Amino acid sequence: MSELQRFFPADQDLLVSLFYRVGRWMSDVDDTDTDEKSEQAEEAQMFAVLTKLSQSKSVGSLCNEIAAEAVRQKGSWTRWAKQIDNTIADVTRAKSVLKGQGTNEEFHLFGRSLVSIATSVARAYREANDADMEKSGIIGWLSEKKNDVTMAIFDPQAHKDLNISPAEDSALTELMDALKG
């Protein structure tokens, strides 16, 4: 019996859709990008992180199955995207479902997985990109690029976090607050 089968069908849909919706929600939080490159990068990153979670031993079998199902149901992403406005409320609902029907470990791994998806999507694209060259001129832009490369070499974690906008950072905090408990 699969791990998901112990949940009612509506709860299965909730859990599976949240793995997609939390990433899409994060992608939609910051609309400072001016073209489709950001959306494409974030969707590609979401697909990659879902695939990775479906194979990871560190998230447990329930989250493996949820992630695999979210990838398998890519045809449902359009339907799930229409529910983005309810994402945080549905995280709270999913928390109740997992507390009632799952284990404490599954509850924590589910939350960690959601945060991982959201963080990965937030880091996928740097909204303040090469358009800054027009504002600061070629010399200022090259100087900024040099600083980026230096930071990427000496502090890769901080460099990744440069991609997270203030709006995305606030959304990550909102997600973590919803998962507390």
Image (spheres, rainbow, N blue to C red):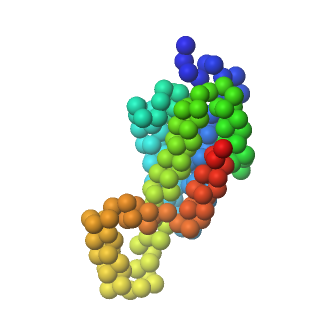
Residue 56 visible: yes
Q: Position of residue 85 (x, y in %)?
A: 71, 50
Q: Residue furthest top?
A: 1
x and y, in percent, of residue 66 in the image:
54, 31
User: For the C terminus, which image quadrant?
Assistant: top right
Task: Between residue 9 and residue 98, name the one nearer to us.
Answer: 98
Left or right: 53 in relation to 156:
right
Q: Nearer the viewer, residue 113 or 135?
A: 113
Q: Position of residue 25 (x, y in %)?
A: 61, 51
Q: Residue at position x 41%, y 72% from top?
A: 130
Residue sitting at 44 percent across and 78 percent down?
A: 132
Q: Is residue 37 visible?
A: no
On-image quarter of the N terminus: top right
Q: Position of residue 44 (x, y in %)?
A: 45, 47
The residue under the point 49% across, 47% down is 116
Compare residues 133 and 177 and report the one nearer the observer: 177
Q: Is residue 47 above or below residue 125?
A: above
* Direction from residue 108 to residue 87 in the image, left or right: right
Total marks in image: 0
Q: Residue at x 47, y 51 (%)?
A: 120
